[in-house]
Image (cartoon, helix red, strand yellow):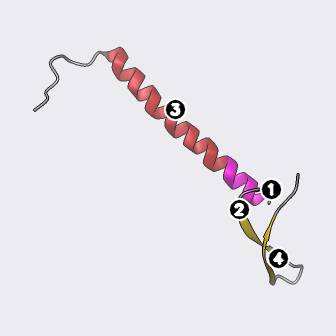
Amino acid sequence: MGVPKKRTSISKKSIRKNIWKRKGSLAYLKAFSLGKSLLTENSKSFFYRQKTSTGSSIGLKKNLKK
């Protein structure tokens, strides 16, 4: 059974904590960017329903703006 021999230093602990925080912050940025592109209908990788002026949906369309 593996048991650590020495206590982890404060600097090593802070390095690991910063890596963990950075991963969370990158995931947040990706999710926020994707949500923003879906709301503005600029997404190039998702299908969404387009609505007519009466409110009924036409079907699935892919946005191909460049």
* Residue named by callout 3: 22
Mark 2 and mark 3 lie on one chain; the one further toward the N terminus is: 3
**Alpha carbon separation for disc pair 2 and 4:** 16 Å
Mark 4 and mark 3 lie on one chain; the one further toward the N terminus is: 3
Say which amino acid is labelled 3. Answer: Arg
Q: Going 65% across and 48% down the picture, which residue do you hit?
A: 32
Q: Position of residue 46 (x, y in %)?
A: 71, 62
Say which amino acid is labelled 2. Answer: Phe
Is 43 or 54 nearer to us in this picture?
A: 43
Query: Quick check: 47 above or below 66?
Result: below
What predominant SS class does the magenta segment belong to? helix
In the rendered structure, does residue 37 fall within the stretch colored magenta?
A: yes
* Residue named by callout 4: 51
Say which amino acid is labelled 1. Answer: Asn
In the rendered structure, does residue 20 fall within the stretch colored magenta?
A: no
* Residue named by callout 2: 46
Q: Going 41% across and 28% down the picture, which residue do you hit?
A: 17
Per the rendered image, the range of residues in magenta is: 33-40
**Alpha carbon separation for disc pair 1 and 3:** 27 Å
Q: Going 17% across and 23% down the picture, which residue do you hit?
A: 4
Is 46 or 55 nearer to us in this picture?
A: 46
Mark 1 and mark 3 lie on one chain; the one further toward the N terminus is: 3
Task: Label 3: state its secondary structure.
Answer: helix
Q: Position of residue 20 (x, y in %)?
A: 44, 33
Query: Quick check: 48 above or below 24?
Result: below
Direction from residue 35 to residue 13 in the image, left or right: left
Identify the image quadrant of the N terminus. Answer: top left
Mark 2 or 3: the one toward you: 2
* Residue named by callout 1: 42
Query: Quick check: 11 above or below 35?
Result: above
Dot 2 alpha-carbon crowd within 10 angstroms: few under 14, some 14 to 19, many 20 or more:
few
Q: Position of residue 31 (x, y in %)?
A: 61, 49
